[in-house]
Image: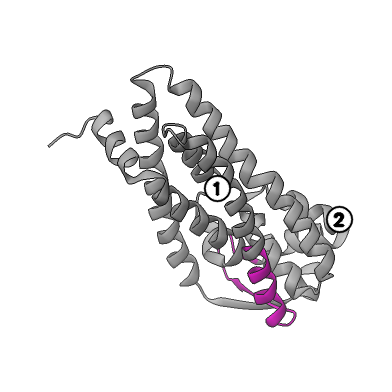
Amino acid sequence: MVVSASEGFGFVASAGPTLVWLIVLSFVFIECAVILGLFLPGDSMLITAGIILANHASGTGHVWALSVGAIIAAVCGNQVGYAIGHRSGNHILARKGGKYLNYTNLHRVNILLERHGFWAVLVARWIPWVRTLCPLVAGAARMNHTRYTVASSIGAVLWAPVLLLIGFYAGGFLNQVPWLMPAVVTILVALLLIGTALGAWHYRQEMARPVEDVTVEEVLD
């Protein structure tokens, strides 16, 4: 049985804003809080969510409300990530031969925080793998919690709403061409599902690698 783009879009649209809210808030929180976030397509998810909301009559209200919700989810996720890093002491669990959670990437993030501090946390929001590692490394490195909170909160305000609104207003243009919106949304949702599935698989592969226990001081060398 072949499902047309319009039928696929009808299924997505019928799910309504509630499903969009659930997915967006979950992805944003996980990306900012735990290692699994390294492997999730957060940026493309926000843009896709904005495009889908553009097709709903109450989309404008939803996209602005969801922007606030996404900011809160990002801020809370950052605090959880910082707390996990802080609780680990100055030890950071890397993976030998890991693609993302490796000594080299931890070294890069730590150097970034050491040299630029506040601004590094702010800019990290726009770099996918750094977005997840930054809270953990900042907590382990005992970065000043107030400075970290201010920087990560400003970063959240400048990240999630911007991508949601880019998607939302792009969706407004797509709606002007009747056949284009269903096709684009179906493709984006399919890519998002594939990206999430691949991310979960890569996460399992990464976690299966041998643990390499390094300290903050070591990754600064």
Q: Which quarter of the figure is the N terminus placed in?
A: top left
The reply to whether the magenta stretch includes residue 101 is: yes
- What amino acid is found at the position of numbered circle 1 in the picture? Leu
Query: What x and y, as percent, mark residue 79?
Result: 68, 68
Closer-to-camera residue (135/24): 24
- What amino acid is found at the position of numbered circle 2 in the picture? His
What is the span of residues highlighted in magenta in the rendered image?
Answer: 77-102
The reply, left or right, for residue 161 in relation to residue 108 is: left
Query: What x and y, as percent, mark residue 137?
Result: 72, 68
For residue 116, the mark is 2
Residue at mark 1: 66
Closer-to-camera residue (207/12): 12
Q: Is residue 85 above or below residue 190?
A: below
Q: Classify mark 2: helix, strand or loop.
A: helix
- Foreground label between 1 and 2: 1
Query: What x and y, as percent, mark residue 146?
Result: 83, 67
Closer-to-camera residue (80/200): 80
Pick whichever of labels 1 and 2 is earlier in the sequence.
1
The reply to whether the magenta stretch includes residue 147 is: no
Q: Which quarter of the figure is the C terminus placed in?
A: bottom right
